[in-house]
Amino acid sequence: MNLIQQIEAEEIAKAGKTIPEFRPGDTVRVGVRVVEGERTRV
């Protein structure tokens, strides 16, 4: 494991979250809130 992968694994472990496995072509839904001036998108 290289240094970057090791740091990523440590950060994920600190956050207490699991990242599911996915492959190219899978649909991934991400909830992001974007504010543009007075407009908000989710």
Image (cartoon, rainbow, N blue to C red):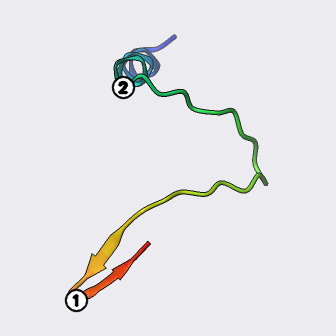
Is 6 positioned to the left or the right of 18 in the image?
left
Residue at the limit of the structure toward the bottom, as seen here: 38
Residue at figure coordinates x 36%, y 26% from the top left: 15
Residue 35 figure quarter: bottom left
Residue at figure coordinates x 65%, y 54% from the top left: 28
Label 1 is placed on what type of residue? Answer: Glu
Query: Circle 1 sits in a helix, a strand or a loop, which is it?
Result: loop
Label 2 is placed on what type of residue? Answer: Ala
Q: Earlier in the sequence, mark 1 or mark 2?
A: 2
Cα distance in 3D space between marks 1 and 2: 32 Å
Residue 41 picture location, percent across and down: 40, 78
Quarter of the C terminus within the rendering: bottom left
Q: Is residue 33 above or below residue 16?
A: below
Identify the disc placed on residue 38. 1
Query: Circle 2 sits in a helix, a strand or a loop, which is it?
Result: helix
Q: Is residue 31 above or below residue 11?
A: below
Classify 10 Å Cα crowding around label 1: few (below 14), some (14-19), many (20 and above).
few
Residue 27 picture location, percent across and down: 72, 56
Q: Which residue is mark 2?
A: 15
Q: Is residue 32 above or below residue 1?
A: below
Q: Is residue 16 above or below residue 33?
A: above
Residue at the limit of the structure toward the top, as seen here: 1
The reply to whether discs 1 and 2 touch (Cβ–Cβ < 8 Å) is no
Residue at the limit of the structure toward the right, as seen here: 25
Is 38 positioned to the left or the right of 27 in the image?
left
Residue at figure coordinates x 79%, y 54% from the top left: 25
